[in-house]
Amino acid sequence: MTPNREDYLKLILELGGDQVKINNKQIVSGLVVSPASVSEMITKLVKEKLVEHTPYQGVQLTTTGLKKASALVRRHRLWEVFLVEHLKYSWNEVHDDAEVLEHVTSETLADHLDDYLEHPSYCPHGGMIPKIDQLVHEKKREKLSDYPVGAKIRIARVLDERELLDYLVSIDLVINEEYTITDIAAYEGDITLKNQKKTVQVSYKAADTIFVDKL
């Protein structure tokens, strides 16, 4: 399914585009689309005053764009919680169905869903779930790829992207797990994580979309 403007806004927000500029390469990687498609969509978002673009630096959400992205993210993440907690979806299965549901969810329905779920603070991927009319400002965190050998970290948040989530399930990496980085292969190779229960090797590409807390 070709990503639409809402997908772009949500990804820019997930990458921290409420506070910093996000470059096209990050968007290409996050949505698995061509550079030309990203450039075309960015032009549209600028015209709609949803993002501001700075040449050679990237894009950042405007106030209008942040409000729209926050509302989208709220509906999407509430459905993800519902699907995981009540319909027993795994965390890598929820994205596509939550995507469909968010587009047919009114604010009234979102409010009732929030009440039913007892106001969850985070989605299954570690992302903040905003309250009514609240703007999303994710906690500023470094990525797994930013840390050296020997660092002790906790997996705090991952991008809500199906290909990435399927990969994380395949290597048995789970949110909130704590690890020590024991090895980093040369030339952006695998990053090896270890705790008392298991050893996990994470590709550099995936590590660049995993946000962690330092212990």
Image (cartoon, grey):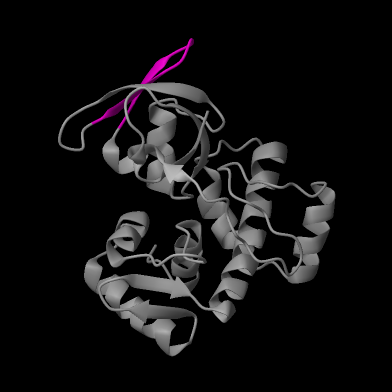
The residue closer to the viewer here, 8 or 143, is: 143
The residue shown at (52%, 78%) is 62
| Residue displayed at 16% across by 31% down | 186
Q: Is residue 27 left or right of residue 87?
A: left
Residue 3 drawn at (x, y percent): 40, 66
Chief SS of the magenta region:
strand
The answer to whether 19 is drawn above or below residue 114 in the figure is below
**Outermost residue to the bottom:** 47
- Quadrant for the N terminus in the image: bottom left
Q: Position of residue 57 (x, y in %)?
A: 30, 70
Q: Where in the figure is residue 33, as x and y percent of width and height?
A: 29, 62
Image-based side of 201 in relation to 118, left or right: left
Q: What residue is shown at x 83% (from left), y 59% (from top)?
A: 112
Mark yes or no: residue 103 visible: no
Indicate left or right for 102 with 210 as reference: right
Is residue 130 visible in the rendered structure shown here? yes
Viewer-nearest residue: 77 or 1: 77
Residue found farthest to the top: 196
- Which quarter of the picture shows residue 148? top left
> Quarter-wise, where is residue 102 in the image?
bottom right
Is 199 contained in the magenta span?
A: yes
Q: Nearer the viewer, residue 115 or 51?
A: 51
In this picture, which residue range is highlighted in magenta? 190-202
Q: Residue at x 46, y 22 (%)?
A: 179
Q: Is residue 70 magenta?
A: no
Q: Position of residue 55 (x, y in %)?
A: 27, 78
